[in-house]
Image (cartoon, rainbow, N blue to C red):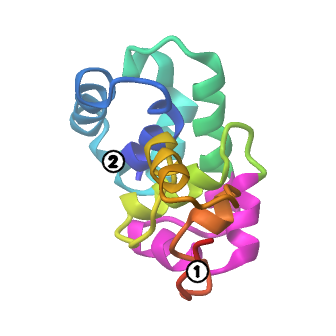
Amino acid sequence: MGAVICDASFHARRKYESTIRPRLVQLQSAWPDAATVRGFQARLAAEDLAAAMNFNAPGRVATAHAITELLVARGVDTRDDLHSWLNHQQNRAALRAVRGIGPKSVDYIGNLVGRSQVAVDVHLRAFAVDAGITDLRYEALSVFQPDGQAGQLG
């Protein structure tokens, strides 16, 4: 879960394969007890995440801490817990209240824990424009809604 939280917190606008993925693999190796949110929280209390990730980005570190605190407070500890927790709109809204987490990040986190969601990015937005879809709100372009119903494009 530490890797999931760090992936969601650190990946935006970075080259994933060369910058983020190696750091996540290293983190998983160095912090094996961070497989749960509580284990990750204990590591955060004892060690510097920026140093562990070799990534000097105070805002992203703060996002990882905030996600961790939220999940611990809500009783989410494992990937399965998070997978189920994301079924509820109020939980998705709580996650979006974390600075640095928007609707795309919530969907991305869902994908990281095995949910089938579309994190609408600039490439999908460009495809929608080319297809003549004029309503470009994220919710309109997303094909998965939290209640499990398919979204309607255009």
Relative image position of residue 59 (x, y in whole percent):
66, 23
Q: Nearer the viewer, residue 68 or 115?
A: 115
Under circle 2, the secondary element is: helix
Q: Does the image show residue 5? A: no
Q: Does the image show residue 55? A: yes
Q: Which residues are magenta?
A: 70-96
Residue reaching furthest top? 56
Q: CA distance from mark 1 to mark 2?
A: 26 Å
- Give the labeled residue for mark 1: 87
Other-residue count near label 1 (Cα within 10 Å), few / some / many at <14 / 14–19 / ≥20? some
**Where is 82 relative to 54, above or below?**
below
**Where is 31 relative to 15, above or below?**
below
- At x 67%, y 48%, the residue is 102
| Residue 145 location, quadrant | bottom right
Check residue 33 in the rendering and tell me which mark sits there, or answer none.
2
Task: Give left or right: position of 113 versus 61.
Answer: left
Dominant SS of magenta comes to helix
- At x 41%, y 24%, the residue is 14
On-image quarter of the C terminus = bottom right
- At x 78%, y 51%, the residue is 97
- At x 47%, y 36%, the residue is 43
Task: Give left or right: position of 114 versus 149.
Answer: left
Relative image position of residue 15 (x, y in whole percent):
34, 24
Viewer-side label of 1, 2: 1
The stretch drawn in magenta includes residue 83:
yes
The stretch drawn in magenta includes residue 143:
no
Task: Give left or right: position of 14 versus 128.
Answer: left
Relative image position of residue 112 (x, y in whole percent):
38, 58
Check residue 129 in the rendering and tell me which mark sits there, or answer none.
none
Mark 1 vs mark 2: which is more N-terminal? 2
Going by the numbered disc 1, the residue's amino acid type is Asn
Going by the numbered disc 2, the residue's amino acid type is Asp
